[in-house]
Amino acid sequence: MEITASMVKVLREKTQAGMMDCKKALTEVEGDLEKAIDLLREKGLSKAAKKADRIAAEGLVKLVIADDMKSGSLVEVNSETDFVAKNEEFIGFVEDLAKMVLEIAPTSVEDLKNKKYMGTEETVQDVLNNKISRIGENMNLRRLAREEAKGAVVGYLHGAGKIAVLVNFDSDAAAGDLQELGKDVAMQIAAMNPMYISRDDVDQSYIEHEREILTAQAINEGKSEEIAKKMVEGRLNKQLKEVCLLEQVFVKDSDFTVKQIIENKAKALGKYIKVAGVQRFEVGEGIEKKEENFADEVAKQLGN
């Protein structure tokens, strides 16, 4: 039987399930609407859709590094509560997704969602929907990243999955020789969250925007325009040292900058070392969290 768009539309309106899930269900029951509704309910997909408007700002980030250290991956999967983030089933799922990103290099989150999950016949989206239904919380595969290196990719995971960092080194040094340096630089990035690797990467529009703000600040402090311009350049340089990784003071030894630490390692090895790429994921960053009164939430769950 041919499954039409109008049939899928009706089923979606009745169940709030995804379009592809509705189409699959209708196909499986040969277009019987009531059976399709039952099938979606059995699979938990209609329930999953109803949870989709709930804010998922907790969760985990996970990373995987290839055995040869030439590539690495990151994923972030969000949940509604930190309790779920500590669930072994959830942790295993996020780790599996990080492995998939490393192995198959999906082009986007949507691409990964449509891939078969770890050799099964189910897609990642299917598995995610099932977990939403079984665990009872909205979950969201938010983002992924993958790095490939000429030298090495080194990672650092902080707080059991709250912050994850990948550092991509372009180098002719052996990958193993870059591991300790990579961990130090990755920990620096986790702690200080630089916006750029070096000044060469800074967007000119960012510099001009900051210069305008700093100039206005100086003038508001009563400085003349000539003095304000001099003050601004000094303040701008100080600010760029804070947002550029290579110019930051090294957190493990404040006598050095990150750039000096890398240069010292390169000199000791007699090899070329450059930070070619950086990825930093922090759970829930940028997501507006809904503030809940815990007592009210418990009462709501109890039906009071």
Image (cartoon, rainbow, N blue to C red):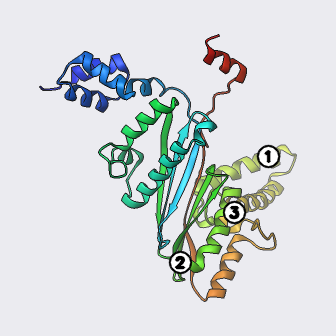
Residue at mark 2 to residue at mark 3: CA–CA distance: 20 Å
Element at label 2: helix
In this orientation, which residue lies closer to the viewer: 246 or 51?
A: 51
Nearer the N terminus, badge 2 or badge 1? 2
Residue at mark 3 to residue at mark 1: CA–CA distance: 30 Å
Taking the spot 60% from the left edge, 41% from the top edge, the residue there is 286
Q: Is residue 152 above or below residue 34?
A: below
Picture mark count = 3
> Residue furthest toward the left?
1
Taking the spot 36% from the left edge, 58% from the top edge, the residue there is 104
Query: What's under tag 2, amino acid-wise?
Result: Ala
Q: Which residue is mark 2?
A: 175
Element at label 3: helix
Residue at mark 2 to residue at mark 1: CA–CA distance: 47 Å
Query: What's under tag 1, amino acid-wise?
Result: Gln
Q: Callout 1: 10 Å neighbours few (<14), some, many (20+)? A: some
Q: Which residue is mark 1?
A: 217
